[in-house]
């Protein structure tokens, strides 16, 4: 256990932190408008792009950049980002590491599965749960934000044609409300299974819920099929945009934290197991520096592998950046990543393909395993993760956007007790 040290950094008000978090929605909005102005022939094309995103079934893998266009996809993600910030401000939430992780995860998946139609029913379910339990919605809002991992279930029932037109919209709303209502109590119980070694705990919970609901649909002869809709063009302006955002985080972190770059190795001492909130342990300065470094690290990894910055890969990069405030850093993430790459090579997978790259990025959900038990066990965990994540999506039919969180929970629940048993035997 680490004792919180006295943090020598400039005092930063909550509004100041919100402004830092608003950097990415702002640059996404500007970028989206510029791209839209230069590539779309008229306003009707913009409306069509939004319509295509909002009315898409959104199951894995549905890339909104391909579905609605590059400019519209970025405007859509920016709008969701601004709405999340307004939510934080309205409920006067403390901006801690987990909230930052949730924010960047939701923004990331706004390119890939989550939209302005399939998110609200799950939030409504969370609101109803909070009222039923007679607690403030602010106490469950974090879980609900992560719970939008199952938003494709809402869109699938509404827009895929599996439900008759007369019942499709009500069915989607009902299933979304149901998910939002049950995911809070379920998530706390699921945490016990992996004992905090899987950072995407809601991904594991969502995988269980998604499997149950998908199995029910299949027994009703409603077949849910995964899709493969991906943007496959390189956009170098997008690489520069993301790099600029991550560099800005490092600069801001250095301005907040005196000698931030010199003190940065302090953050590497943490194992990362839930709960490891870097904002509380090391302050916002080092947290923002770590987020910027992990963002550049992720971009570099995608570039080395020859990947394209499309919707799913952007979701992977931004999720890593978010959880760089809550458990992830280069030291505990790297062994997992290397293990996944080794497994991909052994099984003959194409390292340049989007499914493999997002498996590599999202595998860092089990970074605490490497942080706790060392790099060798981290390598083994990464290999196991790849073996599971490439097949486990069939169980829930692509309905759980946090497929790697589902796989990571199983890996942690399986591997950690075995490692502990051997250690105790020694």
Image (tube, rainbow, N blue to C red):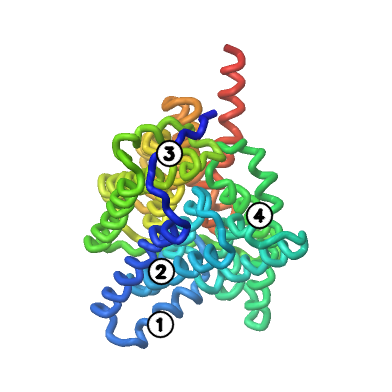
**Closer to the eye: label 3 or 4:** 3
- On residue 209, the disc is 4
Q: Earlier in the sequence, mark 2 or mark 4?
A: 2
Residue depicted at 47% across the width and 33% down the height: 5
Mark carried by residue 7: 3
Which of the 4 image quarters holds residue 293? top left
Disc 1 and disc 4 in contact, CB within 8 angstroms: no
Disc 1 is placed on an element classified as helix
Point 39% across, 39% down: residue: 8
Q: Which residue is mark 1?
A: 48
Q: How far apart are the two marked residues, 2 and 4, measured between alpha carbons?
A: 29 Å
First of labels 3, 4 by sequence position: 3
Mark in front: 3 vs 2: 3
Q: CA distance from mark 2 to mark 1?
A: 18 Å
The label nearer to you, 2 versus 1, is: 2
**Secondary structure under the numbered disc 4 in the rendered image:** helix
**Which residue was labeled with disc 2?**
78
Which of the marked residues, 3 or 2, is nearer the chain's N terminus?
Answer: 3
Q: Secondary structure at mark 2?
A: helix
Q: Position of residue 88 (x, y in %)?
A: 53, 63
Whether residue 276 is situated above or below residue 212 in the rendered picture: above
Q: Please report the residue visible at 45 percent of the width from the left and 80 percent of the height from the top.
A: 51
Return the disc, 2 or 1, that comes first in the chain's sequence. Answer: 1
Q: Quadrant of residue 53?
A: bottom left
Between the residue at mark 3 and the residue at mark 4, the CA separation in whole angstroms equals 41 Å
Nearer to us of marks 2 and 4 is 2
Q: Quadrant of the C terminus?
A: top right
């Amino acid at each position: 256990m680490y004792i919180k040290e006295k943090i020598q950094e400039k005092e930063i008000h909550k509004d100041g932190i919100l402004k830092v978090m608003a950097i990415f929605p702002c640059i996404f909005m500007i970028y989206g408008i510029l791209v839209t102005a230069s590539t779309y022939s008229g306003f009707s094309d913009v409306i069509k792009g939004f319509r295509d995103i909002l009315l898409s079934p959104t199951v894995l893998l549905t890339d909104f950049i391909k579905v609605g266009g590059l400019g519209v996809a970025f405007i859509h993600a920016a709008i969701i980002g601004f709405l999340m910030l307004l939510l934080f401000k309205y409920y006067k939430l403390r901006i801690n590491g987990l909230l930052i992780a949730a924010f960047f995860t939701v923004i990331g998946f706004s390119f890939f599965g989550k939209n302005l139609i399939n998110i609200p029913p799950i939030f409504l379910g969370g609101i109803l749960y909070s009222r039923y339990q007679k607690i403030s919605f602010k106490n469950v809002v974090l879980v609900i934000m992560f719970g939008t991992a199952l938003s494709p279930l809402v869109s699938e029932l509404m827009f895929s044609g599996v439900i008759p037109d007369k019942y499709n919209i009500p069915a989607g709303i009902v299933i979304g409300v149901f998910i939002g209502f049950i995911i809070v109590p379920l998530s706390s119980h699921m945490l016990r299974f992996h004992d905090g070694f899987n950072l995407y705990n809601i991904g594991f919970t969502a995988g269980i819920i998604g499997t149950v609901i998908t199995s029910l649909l299949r027994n009703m002869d409603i077949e849910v099929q995964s899709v493969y809709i991906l943007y496959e063009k390189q956009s170098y302006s997008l690489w520069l945009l993301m790099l600029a955002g991550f560099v800005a985080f490092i600069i801001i972190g250095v301005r907040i934290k005196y000698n931030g770059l010199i003190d940065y190795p302090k953050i590497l001492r943490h194992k990362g197991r839930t709960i490891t909130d870097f904002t509380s342990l090391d302050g916002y300065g080092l947290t923002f520096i770590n987020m910027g470094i992990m963002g550049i690290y992720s971009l570099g990894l995608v570039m080395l592998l020859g990947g394209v910055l499309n919707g799913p890969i952007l979701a992977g990069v931004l999720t890593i950046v978010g959880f760089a405030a809550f458990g992830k850093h280069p030291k505990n993430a790297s062994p997992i990543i290397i293990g996944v790459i080794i497994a991909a090579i052994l099984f003959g997978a194409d390292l340049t393909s989007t499914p493999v790259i997002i498996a590599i990025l999202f595998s860092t959900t089990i970074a605490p395993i490497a942080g706790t038990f060392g790099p060798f066990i981290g390598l083994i965990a990464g290999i196991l993760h790849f073996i599971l994540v490439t097949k486990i999506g069939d169980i829930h039919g692509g309905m759980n956007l946090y497929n790697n969180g589902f796989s990571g929970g199983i890996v942690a629940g399986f591997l950690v007790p075995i490692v502990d048993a051997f250690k105790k035997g020694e």
